[in-house]
Amino acid sequence: MPLSNYTDNEKEFVHQQYEQMLKEHQQGETVLVSHYGELSQEVITGLEGAVEEKITSLEIPKGPIKKIFFISVETLQNMLIHGHKNNKGEQHNFFILVKNGSHLQVISSNLVSNSSIPTLEKQIETINSFEDEKALKAYYLEHLENNTMSEKGGAGLGFITIGMKSGNKLKMDFKKINENFSLFTLVSSVSLS
């Protein structure tokens, strides 16, 4: 199969997943903010404004509002910096903020190379293995001390900070698109009470 077909498939695949997920969450839940497409610093600034406006209009305590805003910003920055680009240099991703009963959920999806999946799974499984907030914070501090920066500028701390702020287990999913890429979906949830 020619490379160009794969590239078109990646964009199509991600868009179909976005449409499907949006439809699923619109049934019985409230979609507060959604974005499909490439990210830039300008787009992220606009999304941060939309997230802030939507969550501050809800009648919920300040604690969860701060957490969800922090997680949204961290998630968007992670997608921009670490999301993989296809062979045409395009990033295909989406972001959805949902109010689901007594929770707010940040859902993000972006391309990852198939070879990076085991590392991502291990990172998130490790974060989810901590039963207590203090142990996760100690892991974060140890990670901060012992880790060197990656070539993209992070020390792998994004998922840890999201896990710490969320206070809930992170959910992940990988859907294989082709031999090069998969769609990585991360769901972080904040309790409103």
Image (tube, helix red, strand yellow):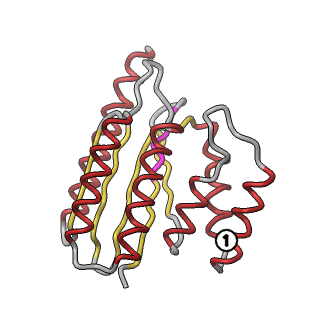
Name the one closer to the observer, 74 or 7. 74
Location of residue 147 in the rendering, given as x and y in whole percent from the top left corner: 76, 48
Location of residue 37 in the rendering, given as x and y in whole percent from the top left corner: 30, 36
Q: Which residue is drawn at 45% across and 38% down?
A: 80
Location of residue 22 in the rendering, given as x and y in whole percent from the top left corner: 24, 55
- Reading the image, the residue beneath label 1 is 129
Name the one closer to the observer, 114 or 132. 132
> In the figure, is residue 140 to the left or right of 24?
right
State the residue lying farthest toward the right. Answer: 146
Quadrant in which the N terminus appears: top left
Q: Quadrant of residue 151?
A: top right
Q: Is residue 184 magenta?
A: yes
Q: Residue at x 31, y 38 (%)?
A: 43
Quadrant in which the C terminus appears: bottom left
Magenta stretch secondary structure, dominant: strand
Report the span colored magenta: 181-185
Q: Quadrant of residue 143?
A: bottom right
> In the figure, is residue 65 to the left or right of 179?
left
